[in-house]
Image (cartoon, rainbow, N blue to C red):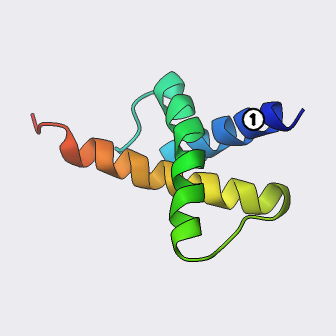
């Protein structure tokens, strides 16, 4: 059951990160995928600082931070039109 919660939190985090990053979102489906990947990235980033997520809210914050960083990196690496 834990794996399903990680996916749900990642999807919610991708949605929130897309809303926070105005102009940095790439559509609903891509933002959801970014949220799932961002959860892993956020966990890694927080681990570097010795922080750990506890509970639903901690996992959500970690995933949103990771998704925002990932969306920023993607938008930074995309060629400007």
Quadrant position of residue 12: top right
- The spot of residue 54 in percent (x, y) is 81, 65
Q: Nearer the viewer, residue 52 or 65?
A: 52
- The spot of residue 29 in percent (x, y) is 52, 23
The residue carrying mark 1 is 8
Q: Tell me the residue at 59%/37% (across/down).
A: 36
40 vs 57, left or right, is left
For label 1, count other residues whose C-alpha is less than 10 Å away and answer few (under 14), some (14-19) or many (20+).
some
Q: Is residue 50 visible?
A: yes
- The spot of residue 14 in percent (x, y) is 57, 40
Q: Tell me the residue at 47%/27% (across/down).
A: 30
Secondary structure under badge 1?
helix
80 vs 45, left or right, is left
Q: Nearer the viewer, residue 19 or 45?
A: 45
| Count of labels in the image | 1
Task: State the quadrant of the C terminus.
Answer: top left
Q: Tell me the residue at 60%/57% (across/down).
A: 43
Q: Nearer the viewer, residue 48 or 25?
A: 48
Q: Compared with residue 79, is residue 76 higher up or lower down, i.e. above or below?
A: below
- The spot of residue 34 in percent (x, y) is 49, 36
45 vs 22, left or right, is right
Q: Compared with residue 40, is residue 49 higher up or lower down, i.e. above or below?
A: below
Q: Is residue 22 visible?
A: no
Task: State the quadrant of the N terminus.
Answer: top right
Q: Residue furthest bottom?
A: 50
Q: Residue furthest right?
A: 1
């Amino acid at each position: 059951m834990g794996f399903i919660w990680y996916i749900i939190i990642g999807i919610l985090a991708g949605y929130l990160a897309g809303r926070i990053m105005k102009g940095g979102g790439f559509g609903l489906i891509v933002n959801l995928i970014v949220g799932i990947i961002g959860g892993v990235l956020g966990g890694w980033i927080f681990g570097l600082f010795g922080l750990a997520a506890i509970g639903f809210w901690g996992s959500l914050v970690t995933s949103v931070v990771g998704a925002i960083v990932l969306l920023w990196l993607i938008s930074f690496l995309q060629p400007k039109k």
